Structure formats: C-alpha cells, structure tokens
Image (cartoon, grey):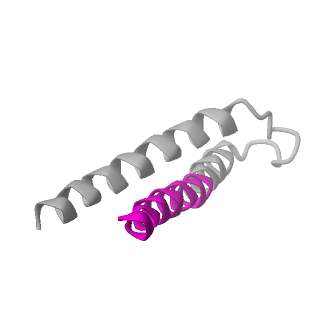
C-alpha cells in the first residue's frame, strides 16, 4: 500500500515538473504576432492552457515509460 502512495507522489511531481517546463518553454515563444492587438488576457490564457496540455502529454509519456520499465523487471525475476 505504501508503494502506491510513493507512486502517486512521483506522478504528481512529474506532472508539476513537466507543466512548469512546458510553461517556461512556451513563454519563450513570441505569440503576439498570432493574437489580435489588445487581447493580452487571451494570450496569457492560451499560453497557460497550452502549457498544461503539453505538460500533461509529456508527463503521461514519462509515467508510461516508468510504469513499463517497472513491469519489465518482473519479466526477469
């Protein structure tokens, strides 16, 4: 039961890290050319939701790799 708690903590940490990294990466992109003038809030909302989506996808990939690698060791033992 304790391993499930550790796994849940690692999953949450992975999601937080990947969302933060994707937010930092998307903040470097200059999207002012794509957004209409005087729509600053919409541009910020777009960056926020895009970083959440990208962070979720990357986090799922890392979690799937982690889960599969943990399952793979059962093949040999």
The answer to which quarter of the image holds residue 30 is top right
| Location of residue 52 with respect to 21 vertically, above or below | below
In-image side of 25 versus 60 (left or right):
right
Q: Position of residue 64 (x, y in %)?
A: 51, 64
50 or 71: which is nearer to us?
Answer: 71
Quarter occupied by the C terminus: bottom left
Query: Where are the magenta residues, as a range?
Result: 53-77
Residue farthest left in this picture: 1
Q: Residue at x 51, y 45 (%)?
A: 18
Residue farthest right in this picture: 33
| Location of residue 40 with respect to 1 vertically, above or below | above
Q: Is residue 28 magenta?
A: no
9 or 37: which is nearer to us?
Answer: 9
Q: Position of residue 26 (x, y in %)?
A: 68, 39
In-image side of 11 versus 40 (left or right):
left
In-image side of 66 versus 44 (left or right):
left
Q: Residue at x 53, y 59 (%)?
A: 65
Q: Is residue 63 magenta?
A: yes
The answer to which quarter of the image holds residue 11 is bottom left
In-image side of 65 versus 70 (left or right):
right
Dominant SS in magenta = helix
Q: Residue at x 60, y 42 (%)?
A: 22
Residue farthest top in this picture: 28
Q: Position of residue 48 (x, y in %)?
A: 57, 49
Quarter occupied by the N terminus: bottom left
Q: Residue at x 55, y 37 (%)?
A: 21
């Amino acid at each position: 039961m304790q391993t499930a708690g550790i796994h849940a903590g690692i999953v949450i940490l992975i999601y937080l890290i990947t969302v933060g990294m994707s937010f930092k990466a998307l903040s470097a992109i200059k999207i002012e050319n794509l957004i209409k003038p005087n729509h600053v809030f919409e541009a910020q909302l777009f960056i926020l939701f895009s970083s959440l989506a990208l962070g979720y996808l990357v986090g799922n990939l890392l979690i799937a790799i982690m889960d599969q690698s943990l399952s793979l060791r059962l093949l040999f033992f």
